[in-house]
Image (spheres, rainbow, N blue to C red):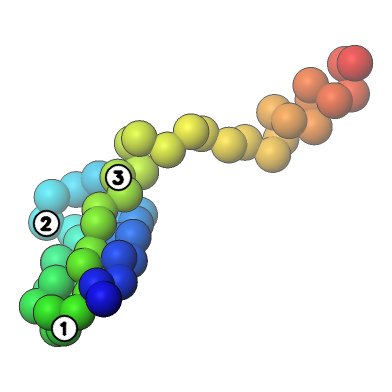
Amino acid sequence: MIKTIGLICGSLRKDSYSRIIAQSLKNIDRSIQFRWIEINELPLSNEYLKKMVIKKQ
């Protein structure tokens, strides 16, 4: 059974250190499949803006 693990890199830069390290994980174990979750595809969250909206209601 192959396990799938999502990798989130906190930088959009192609050559960031965290991205290089995450990419090196792909060759560790054949029973693990890694899937990239790009941060530019995630919805933005801003706690300050959420508090302002709640106060206005």
For marks 3 and 2, the one nearer the N-term is 2
Crowd rating for badge 2 (residues with CA inside 10 Å; few <14, some 14–19, many 20+): few
Amino acid type at circle 1 is Asp
Disc 3 to disc 2, how far (Cα)? 14 Å
In the displayed structure image, the side of residue 46 where residue 16 appears, left or right: left
- Res. 12 mark: none
Amino acid type at circle 3 is Glu
Query: Dot 3: what SS?
Result: loop
Give x and y (percent) for residue 56: 88, 16
Is residue 11 visible to us here?
no
Amino acid type at circle 2 is Asp
Q: Which residue is mark 3?
A: 38
Crowd rating for badge 3 (residues with CA inside 10 Å; few <14, some 14–19, many 20+): some
In the picture, residue 35 is in which quadrant? bottom left
Residue 17 vertical position relative to residue 44 in the rendered view, above or below: below
Residue 49 vertical position relative to residue 25 in the rendered view, above or below: above
In the displayed structure image, the side of residue 14 where residue 41 appears, left or right: right
Q: Which residue is mark 2?
A: 15
Residues 32 and 2: in front is 2
Give x and y (percent) for residue 57: 90, 16
Q: Which residue is mark 1?
A: 29
In the displayed structure image, the side of residue 13 where residue 49 appears, left or right: right
Query: Dot 1: what SS?
Result: loop
Query: Dot 2: what SS?
Result: loop
Disc 1 to disc 2, how far (Cα)? 23 Å
Give x and y (percent) for residue 6: 33, 60
Q: Residue at x 70, y 28 (%)?
A: 49
Give x and y (percent) for residue 31: 19, 79
Crowd rating for badge 1 (residues with CA inside 10 Å; few <14, some 14–19, many 20+): few
Residues 50 and 33: in front is 33
